[in-house]
Structure formats: structure tokens, C-alpha cells
Image: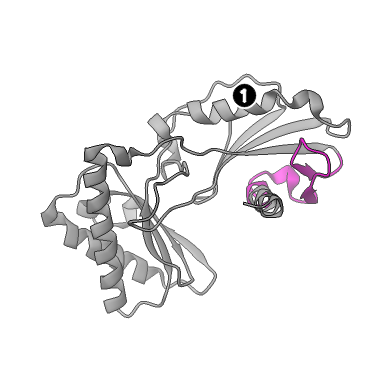
């Protein structure tokens, strides 16, 4: 990633997150010339943005490899069935649960996914989401959520969970950035930190997942007790558009 593309990504994530923070709605969001922080909001708020990536992948574990193969099979089946239904080109990311998918359930699960995506009937450029509650009960137990984009990007599958279903990795990223607070410019009288899970997913058979997403059911995430010198700390899951204030 080039320096310019990194700055573009930081601004994109900052603007996506700021929609969820009402007091920022009327303030300009621009790249900061002095770093840290990465982004300047208005005259006095500095935002340091850090990506939260998984350090490892479950692919090395035999059970996880077998599960991934099952999920890939269902994704390919669902895509084929969607196309047979005459659905327009869309981009679909299926986030599976960790439960094994019995062979007898795979075709039915694929059919449920294909029909649910077809029912959305998204216009080009529009994004939608399918929650487990919108799927038949037999299918819902294997899926944590489906993100659908009204553009022809194909189907892929990914994991959707914090490592160990905890905030430890996110908090570690905040601690890393606390050490730079002494270098912040005087104009930044409000010092905020935004931890971003970029929401990257890879097509079946591609490289190991490196992005850390969260559970699509935010209520299942534990509470956070974070003491920090930052004035505020937020977490953004860029794929699901979920924002949570941590401090």
C-alpha cells in the first residue's frame, strides 16, 4: 500500500465512522499534515487511526481447514443457484458461524442464501445486509450474516469474529498509539483514537484472511473497561458498519 493510498483509506474510514458520531456531522474531515494524528476534524479534534489485523489464521488447524472447505462449497453452490434464479450481478460476502455444515444441509443452506440475496433486489451501488433471523431456522444456525453490494464483484466467504471473541487485540492497538501522544501538535486539544477492522475478505482458495471482523450480533460482544489517556476511543468494523465507543 502506497502512502497516498493509505491516507485515502484513513480518510474513507474516518468519514464512514463519523456518520455515527452526531457532533462531527457538520465538521470538515481532512488529512493531518503533522502526524500523529492521521486525521483532523474541525479545528481541534485529532484522530489517530490504526488497523486491527489478525496475526494468524485458523487455516493451519485441520478442523478449521475442513470447515473452510465446507463453507467454500456452500458459497459456490449458492452463487450458482443465485445465477440460475436470474439474479443481477452482485457482490456477496457470506460470514459463516463456526459450526460444521453436514453434507445433507449444504445444498439447502445454499438455496436459502441464494433466495435471500435475490429477494433483496438491490440497485447498483446500494449495499444491503441479511441477518440470520431473515433466513430459515435450519440455515440461520450456520450463518452470522451476509453483506450484499449492488455491483458485480462475485461471491466470497469470510470469518466474522474478534480473535477469541474479546477486545484484547483492539486494546493492544490502542496501547501502541498511546506512546505517540507526546508528539501530537498543540492544535489537537481533543485526542481521539479510532481502531478499524478493515473488513477485508478473500475469495475461496485465496490467501489467508488477515482482517479481523466482529460478530454481526454486537450484543454478544463483551463490555470493555478501558482506561486511556486518549479523550475518546472508538472501534469501527468497516464491513458491517458497526461502531462502538470503547472509552
Residue located farthest toward the left when viewing the structure as drawn: 104
Q: Residue sitting at 71 percent across and 21 percent down?
A: 229
Q: Residue 23 in the image: state x and y as whole percent.
A: 74, 43
Q: Which residues are magenta?
A: 15-43
The verdict on residue 32 being magenta is yes
- Judging from the image, the colouring scheme is one colour
Q: Is residue 220 above or below residue 104?
A: above
Q: Callout 1: few (<14), some (14-19), or many (20+) C-alpha neighbours within 10 Å?
A: some
Q: Residue sitting at 25 percent across and 44 percent down?
A: 65
The verdict on residue 201 being magenta is no
Q: Residue 87 in the image: state x and y as whole percent.
A: 36, 77
Quadrant in which the C terminus is drawn = top right
Q: Quadrant of residue 178?
A: top right
Q: Secondary structure at mark 1?
A: helix
The answer to whether residue 178 is seen in the rendering is yes
Which residue is the site of mark 1? Answer: 175
Q: Residue sitting at 28 percent across and 41 percent down?
A: 98
Task: Compare residues 14 and 55 and report the one nearer the observer.
Answer: 55
Q: Is residue 124 above or below residue 91?
A: below
Q: Residue sitting at 46 percent across and 37 percent down?
A: 54
Indicate left or right for 61 with 238 as reference: left
Q: Residue 53 in the image: state x and y as whole percent.
A: 51, 39
Indicate left or right for 110 with 31 as reference: left
Q: Quadrant of residue 46?
A: top right
Amino acid at each position: 500500500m502506497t502512502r497516498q493510498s493509505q491516507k485515502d483509506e484513513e480518510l474513507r474510514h474516518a468519514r464512514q465512522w463519523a456518520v455515527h458520531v452526531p457532533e462531527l456531522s457538520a465538521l470538515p474531515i481532512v488529512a493531518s499534515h503533522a502526524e500523529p494524528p492521521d486525521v483532523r476534524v474541525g479545528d481541534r479534534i485529532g484522530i489517530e487511526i490504526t488497523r486491527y489485523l489478525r496475526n494468524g489464521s485458523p487455516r493451519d488447524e485441520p478442523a478449521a481447514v475442513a470447515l473452510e472447505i465446507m463453507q467454500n462449497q456452500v458459497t459456490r453452490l449458492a452463487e450458482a443457484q443465485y445465477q440460475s434464479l436470474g439474479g443481477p450481478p452482485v457482490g456477496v460476502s457470506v460470514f459463516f458461524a463456526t459450526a460444521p455444515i453436514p453434507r445433507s444441509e449444504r445444498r439447502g443452506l445454499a438455496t436459502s442464501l441464494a433466495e435471500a440475496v435475490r429477494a433483496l433486489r438491490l440497485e447498483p451501488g446500494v449495499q444491503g445486509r441479511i441477518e440470520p433471523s431473515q433466513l430459515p431456522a435450519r440455515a440461520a444456525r450456520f450463518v452470522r450474516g451476509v453483506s450484499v453490494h449492488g455491483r458485480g464483484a462475485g461471491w466470497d466467504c469470510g470469518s466474522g469474529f474478534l480473535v477469541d471473541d474479546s477486545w484484547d487485540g483492539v486494546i493492544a492497538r490502542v496501547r501502541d498509539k498511546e506512546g505517540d501522544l507526546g508528539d501530537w501538535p498543540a492544535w489537537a486539544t481533543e485526542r481521539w483514537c479510532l481502531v478499524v477492522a478493515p473488513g477485508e475478505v478473500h475469495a475461496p482458495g485465496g490467501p489467508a484472511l488477515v482482517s479481523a471482523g466482529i460478530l454481526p450480533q454486537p450484543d454478544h460482544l463483551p463490555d470493555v473497561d478501558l482506561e486511556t489517556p486518549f479523550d475518546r476511543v472508538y472501534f469501527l468494523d468497516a464491513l458491517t458498519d458497526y461502531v462502538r465507543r470503547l472509552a
